[in-house]
Amino acid sequence: MKHNPAFIQLVEEVRNRVRECSLETMRTMLAQNDSMPVIDVREDREVRKGIIPGAIHIGRGVLERDIESMIPDKN
């Protein structure tokens, strides 16, 4: 699928602000800090197939609206 230039620009801008990690890094982080929130932004149909135990599902369409009330600690 070919995306429009405005969408591509938005993705590039956001990529610079989003921290990603590998699966192994995530496993290590969860093992060291079991209170760390994990946010699953996948679609409902994807979450029904499985979710990380303890993860919080916030659909991507409402993430910005709901995240602060569900996860007040921005760190």
Image (cartoon, rainbow, N blue to C red):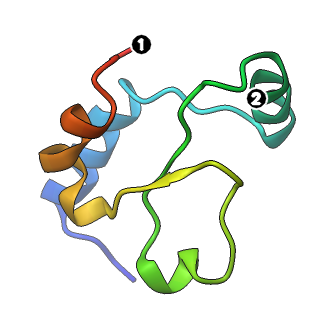
Residue 6 location, quadrant: bottom left
Amino acid residing under circle 2: Leu
Q: Is the residue 30 above or below the residue 43 in the image?
A: above
Q: SS for tag 1?
A: loop
In the rendered image, residue 58, in percent from the top left (x then y), is placed at: 35, 57
Q: Position of residue 42 (x, y in %)?
A: 47, 67
- Of residues 14 and 37, the one nearer the viewer is 37
Residue 61, above or below 53: below
Which residue is label 2 attached to?
30
Residue at x-position 36% and y-position 24%: 17
Q: Secondary structure at mark 2?
A: helix
| Mark 2–mark 1 distance (CA, rounded to whole Å) | 15 Å
Answer few, some or many: residues within 10 Å of disc 2's Cα (few below 14, many 20 plus, some between 14 and 19).
Answer: some
Residue drawn 38% across the image and 25% down it: 16
Q: Nearer the viewer, residue 55 or 24?
A: 55
**Which residue, given by chain and number where applicable, does mark 1 sit on?**
75
Q: Position of residue 69 (x, y in %)?
A: 20, 36
